[in-house]
Image: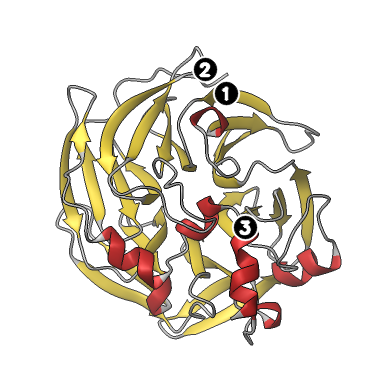
Amino acid sequence: MAFARRLSVLSAALIAVSVPSAAIAASHSGNAIAASRSGNATVSRLVTGLQGGLGSTVGPDGALYVTETAAGRITRVDPQTGATTTYAEGLPKPVIGLGGATDIAFLGHTAYVLVTLVGPDVGGSDIDGIYRVDGPHRFTVVANIGQFAINHPPATPFEVPSGLQFALQPYRGGFLVTDGHHNRVYRVTLDGKVTQLIAFGNIVPTGLAVRGGTIYMAEAGPVPHLPENGKVVSFGPKSATATQVASGSPLLVDVEFGRGRTLYALSQGVGSGGPPGSPALPDTGALVKVNADGTFTDVTDRLDRPTSLEFIGTTAYVVTLGGDIWKIDGVSGPPHGIAR
């Protein structure tokens, strides 16, 4: 359709991790197995067959919770056995082959889901925003982020008025949300108030992490996703600009702290060279560690288009576009790292 063609101007980073059906099929075609580069980490596949794995979090019970965008579902995953159960279903599904439930986070024992690209501006009939999970089949919209984006357009060029919200991060009793198309971060309260916390040029903000009063954010970088544009940056709640923490890994889609103060980032992989909207090349993703000198060190490479990263103790869990979850044991050691 004409609108889908117009979406090709968006960053390949965000569309690549938003579960177009062709990308899902392609991601199953890779034959390489993720490899450890740390010398101590061991890699194994915990789960396969999710319908478009994208966002994830660790719940209050210590389990993993993953958004299956193509199914409109949240799945609970036992981090030891890989056993899966449906936690909630009935969320808006993608309207144009991408979007839907992109991320999940808990405040206390209550789950909230970030939903994007399901509103009228893309031919849908749902709300782009944060949905509270009230039961296995019940949700309440607590914030209409898409309408805020429409009412307050960004300074950078855009094609989708409602934006493309990507990551959901608990923050001071509410949430932070990245918008990878409108190049900004929102602050959202539980009473539905949405404000712009910080705005950027065309850097494609993706994953978020918080430590103390500092917010850390991954940047995928614009097409063609050069390694030097894959960055982790930091800023505070009143910052006008961000400070570079590290750079040099292509198409970063997430950032998380491991055990202690060690910071890690997730690279979806090398840009494919195809038209905007194309996924990264198969089996070129990596889990990388942030070094104090502003560089990255590969921990595990040959990941097939990863989308989300979580840590439980010294074990990393990586969700992939094709519906796998990889378990990487022995990643995070004693406290050390870049925290200021």
Q: Which residue position holds label 1?
A: 245
Rendering quarter of residue 168:
bottom right
The answer to whether marks 1 and 2 mark residues whose Cβ atoms lie closer than 8 Å is yes
- Which numbered disc, 3 or 2, marks the residue that appears first in the sequence? 3
- Seen in the picture, residue 327 relative to 293 is either above or below; the reply is below
Callout 3 amino acid: Leu
Secondary element at image label 1: strand
Q: Nearer the viewer, residue 120 or 192?
A: 120
- Which numbered disc, 1 or 3, marks the residue that appears first in the sequence? 3
Callout 2 amino acid: Gly
Distance, label 3 to label 2, CA atoms, is 28 Å
Q: Which residue position holds label 3?
A: 10
Q: Residue at x 85, y 68 (%)?
A: 151
Image quarter hosting the C terminus = top right
Q: Residue at x 37, y 69 (%)?
A: 22
Q: How many marks?
A: 3
Residue 200 horizontal/vertical position (percent): 74, 41
Single out the mark in the foreground, 1 or 3. Answer: 3
The image's mark for residue 294 is 2
Q: Is residue 270 left or right of residue 326?
A: right
Distance, label 1 to label 3, CA atoms, is 25 Å
Secondary element at image label 3: loop
- Which numbered disc, 1 or 2, marks the residue that appears first in the sequence? 1
